[in-house]
Amino acid sequence: SFHKGKYTLEGCATFYNTTRFKRLDKFVIDYDKLSTQRRAGQQSDADRGLPRWKGDCAGNIALALVLEDQTLKATQGWQAAGPGGGHQLCVINTHILADKEANEVKLWQGEVGVGGKGGK
C-alpha cells in the first residue's frame, strides 16, 4: 500500500461470523514468490505472460477462504455444497500493487487471485 509518500508492507485478513460459517480451506497467494518461481529458467517476461516491473509485486499477497454456510443449505444440484450440505463460497481478500505506473502488474495480480492462467 501507499502511505505518506512511501510504499509499505501490510497484511491481509478476512473476518467472518464463525457461528454461521465454517472454514473448509484457505489459500495464501504470495505474488512475489509466484512471479519469482515463474521467472526461473525462462527467457523473457513477455514469453511467460508475466508483467515487468522493477519491484515485482512489493510484498502483495492474497488470502482466499472457502467457507460453508451453516444456516443456508444448498437445495439445487447446480449449487456448490460443503460437506454439511450448506452453501459453499469462496472469499478473496487481496492487496494489489499501488504503483499507478504498473497497470499490467495489477491486472496479472487480479488474474492470479481469481485462478486465471497467470497463476498456474
Image (cartoon, rainbow, N blue to C red):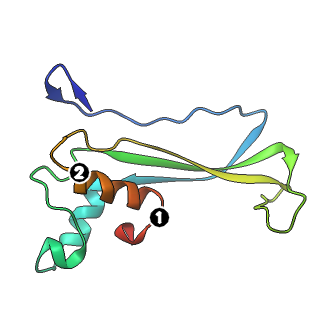
- Identify which residue, 17 or 45, lies in the foreground: 45
Residue at 24 percent across and 55 percent down: it is 105
Residue closest to the far right: 75
| Mark nearer the N terminus (1 vs 2) | 2
Q: Callout 1: helix, strand or loop?
A: loop
Specify the amino acid type for callout 1: Gly
Looking at this rendering, what residue extends furthest in the top direction? 4
Image coords of residue 14 (percent x, y): 54, 36
* Label 1 sits on residue: 115
User: Which residue was labeled with disc 2?
Assistant: 103
| Number of marks | 2
Question: Is 42 above or below relative to 106?
Answer: below
**Residue 17: image x %, image y %?**
70, 31
- Alpha carbon distance from label 1 to label 2: 19 Å
Disc 2 crowd rating (10 Å Cα; few below 14, some 14-19, many 20+) is some
Q: Is residue 31 left or right of residue 12?
A: left
Q: Is there CB contact under 8 Å for labels 1 and 2?
A: no
Q: In which quarter of the image is the C terminus?
A: bottom left
Q: Could you tell me which quadrant the N terminus lies in?
A: top left
Q: What element carries label 2?
A: helix
Q: Is residue 63 or residue 107 the one in the foreground?
A: 107
In the displayed structure, does residue 34 sit left or right of residue 41?
right
Q: Which residue is drawn at 48% across and 35% down?
A: 13
Q: Which of labels 1 and 2 is toward the front?
A: 2
Above or below — where is 71 with respect to 37? above
Residue 10 lies, in percent from the top left, at 32, 32
> Residue 98's image quarter?
top left
Q: Residue 30, position in %: x, y?
A: 34, 53
